[in-house]
Image: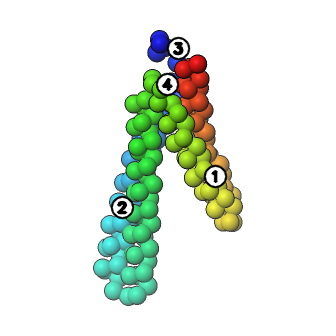
Amino acid sequence: MNETRLKGKTMLKVVGILYIIFAALSILTGLLAVVGGAALGVAGGESLALGLGVVAMVLGVIAILSSVFSLVVGILGVKWCNRPDKAGALFVLGVVLIVLAALNLLSAFSSDSSASVAGSVLGLVLPVLYTLGAWQNKQSLQ
């Protein structure tokens, strides 16, 4: 099959690259939260500082784990953008990303911040584009 005729290839590649960039930045932020939380817990000495430090460390670890998933999704999107036989797996990953982004949006509605809701709505854009690119790529098999 001629690779230039693959639908969704460019979308998967571009969104995959964006996922790689954002995941790398999020991993760095998570590492900073872990290190900062540890420093706060050690230097604080008080129970409040220790508690805040532990919370920062836990949130940092969660951010790192979710970012590693995004990094893998981005790498696979770039690697398999010209492989319509792998588009089914990319589509499933895209659906998982949409579900996670939708859950994030639902939790943002519980906050009073419209900026949080707007950010979560924007957070749905990349997963939808990724899934659409995978679906278009999958259609190239037929």
Horizontal side of 45 relative to 134 (left or right) equals: left
Mark 4 and mark 1 in contact (Cβ < 8 Å)? no
- The residue under the point 36% across, 61% down is 32
Q: Earlier in the sequence, mark 2 or mark 4?
A: 2
Q: Earlier in the sequence, mark 3 or mark 2?
A: 3
Between label 2 and label 4, give the one nearer the viewer: 4
Between label 1 and label 4, give the one nearer the viewer: 4
- In the picture, the disc for residue 5 is 3
Between label 4 and label 3, give the one nearer the viewer: 4
> Where on the picture, by quarter, is residue 82?
top left
> Where on the picture, by quarter, is residue 59?
bottom left
- In the picture, the disc for residue 84 is 4
Between label 2 and label 1, give the one nearer the viewer: 1
Marks 1 and 4 sit apart, C-alpha to C-alpha, by 27 Å
Front residue of 84/16: it is: 84
The three-letter code of the residue at mark 1 reads Ala
Could you classify mark 3 by the number of other residues whose Cα lies within 10 Å: few (under 14), some (14-19), or many (20 or more)? few
Q: Earlier in the sequence, mark 2 or mark 1?
A: 2
Could you classify mark 1 by the number of other residues whose Cα lies within 10 Å: few (under 14), some (14-19), or many (20 or more)? some
SS at circle 1: helix
The residue that disc 2 covers is 32
Note whether 1 is above or below 10 in the view shown: above
Numbered label tally? 4
The residue that disc 1 covers is 102
Q: Position of residue 58 (x, y in %)?
A: 42, 69
Could you classify mark 2 by the number of other residues whose Cα lies within 10 Å: few (under 14), some (14-19), or many (20 or more)? some
Could you classify mark 4 by the number of other residues whose Cα lies within 10 Å: few (under 14), some (14-19), or many (20 or more)? many
Res 97 visible: yes
Q: Position of residue 115 (x, y in %)?
A: 64, 56
The three-letter code of the residue at mark 2 reads Leu
The three-letter code of the residue at mark 3 reads Arg
